[in-house]
Amino acid sequence: MTEEEERAAVLSKRAKGSRRKGGVGEREACRLMEGLTTVKWKRSAIQSRRGGREAADIIPDDEDGSSVIPDEIVALHIEVKRQKQPNLFGALKQAVGDCEGTSRLPMVLARREREEWVVMLRAGDLLRLARALRQPSKKKKPPPSKK
């Protein structure tokens, strides 16, 4: 194996580990948001490594259709960072850019290794976030039966 091939293999291994760690962080963030919102959360299936606008890292989950998710919760655009030294301002800038031209609320959930989760958002968005977290999810009513 050439030196260049060895270097590529090492970088590939690091990238794989980084993606795995990111997935673990996103699952932890889902559990955190479930505790804060009473809504089930999941990792977004749409994620890009090419730059440009991306989907949020985690999103509300209503696959079974059993609950009504408040608009304020649906409007959250959450970037998740679980790294040794997360770049919070860079992550917030990414989230703000992803939300440009929409009514979505950009925020970042970040955690350093062996430390607590922190939330970062723009000060002007704090009231919107507080409203979103106060909204309980409601069970959908079954359609009326036809007699």
Image (cartoon, helix red, strand yellow):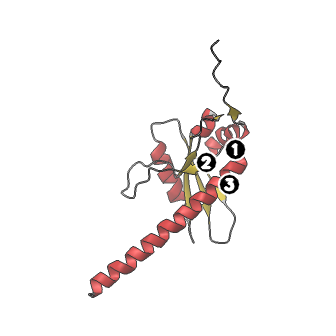
What's the mark number on residue 19? none
Tell me: residue 15, above or below residue 70: below
Q: Position of residue 141 (x, y in %)?
A: 68, 26
Dot 1, crowdedness within 10 Å: few (<14), some or many (≥20)? some
Q: Position of residue 44 (x, y in %)?
A: 50, 50
Dot 3, crowdedness within 10 Å: few (<14), some or many (≥20)? some
Decide which of tag 2 and tag 3 comes sooner along the chain: 3
The answer to whether residue 3 shows anywhere in this view is: yes
Disc 3 marks a residue whose amino acid type is: Leu
Dot 2, crowdedness within 10 Å: few (<14), some or many (≥20)? many
User: Disc 1 vs disc 2: which is toward the camera?
Assistant: 2
The answer to whether residue 87 shows anywhere in this view is: no
Quadrant containing the C terminus is top right
Residue at position x 66%, y 54% in the image: 31
Most extreme residue toward the front is 147
Residue matched to label 1 = 37
Q: CA distance from mark 2 to mark 3?
A: 9 Å
Tell me: residue 59, above or below residue 117: above
Whether tag 3 and tag 1 are in contact, CB under 8 A, the answer is no
**Badge 1 element:** helix
Residue matched to label 2 = 41
| Left or right of 134 on screen, residue 64 | left
Whether tag 1 and tag 2 are in contact, CB under 8 A, the answer is yes
The residue nearer to you, when weighing 120 against 31, is: 31
| Left or right of 5 on screen, residue 61 | right
What's the mark number on residue 32? 3
Disc 1 marks a residue whose amino acid type is: Thr
Q: CA distance from mark 3 to mark 1?
A: 9 Å
**Badge 3 element:** helix
Whether tag 2 and tag 3 are in contact, CB under 8 A, the answer is no
